[in-house]
Image: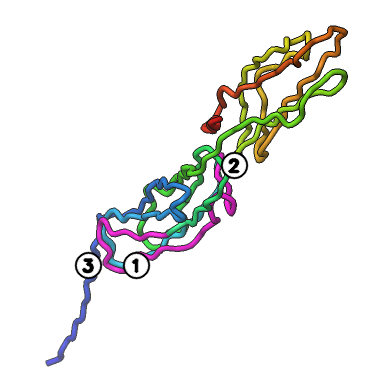
Amino acid sequence: NSEIDVTDTGVGTITDNDAASVSIADVSVSEAAGTATYTVTLTGSVQDSFTVDYATSNNASALGDVDYDITSGTVTFPADSEKGDEQTFTVAITDDSQVEPTETYTVTLSGITGLTTISDGTAIGTITDNDFSEVSIAATTQAGEPGFNGLFTVSLSNPASVTTTVSYSVTGTATADIDYTALVGTIVIPAESISATINVDVIDDSIVETGGETVMVTLISTDSAITIAAE
């Protein structure tokens, strides 16, 4: 009798119906914190390890390597990572003495490997300022007839990153547009500067005046968080 050897192999394929993704959360820190820690979170579970890249970039306000360190790198999720697992990285924040508004920058995820996707790949980093500045005024040049104009200097204790407008009032025994050219009531200190001057242009007349006349300038307010120094 002849023998017949029949070998047959069947392959069963199981198609996966599961999904996994990662996301990154926004972070807000004070400038004094020194670092901002970002968290990349896994939704779903994975069998194999995978990596995802991250990088910072400027947007409308904060500047890389000025307000924060330009940063890029890769985080790795190991094999058998589960839903809710997290990986973190940090971005260094610059603590300066300049008065600034709240600033922001962007962190973006990209280049993910394996079967995992990116569900939310953009985070906004917010830097709140911790600096303080106040504005003061001093009479730096005394005026007199004829031809000796007066000068007030308005100064900040710390510079600001934006232009500062200071409002002031004018009093005293001298009369505007008779003894001196009327002052406008505001002065602008440019960004990055610490002072600006108010010129008092004397009008020379033929009237004999006794006791001298005064021009008094009092600071009232600013258009920013900068405060008026106590006298």
Pointer 1: what residue?
A: 49
Q: Nearer the viewer, residue 31 or 169?
A: 169
Under mark 3, the amino acid is: Gly
Q: How far apart in space, not on screen, are marks 3 and 1 (Cα)?
A: 25 Å
Residue 178's spot in the image, x, y percent? 78, 8
Under mark 1, the amino acid is: Ser
Q: Residue placed farthest to the left in the image?
A: 1
Residue 121, above or below 2:
above
Which residue does the image show at 61% across and 26% down from the upper left? 166
Q: Which residues are magenta?
A: 60-89
Pointer 2: what residue?
A: 158
Left or right for 57, reference 143: left
Residue 168, above or below 194:
above
Count of marks, rendered view: 3
N-term mark: 2 or 1: 1
Q: Secondary structure at mark 2?
A: loop
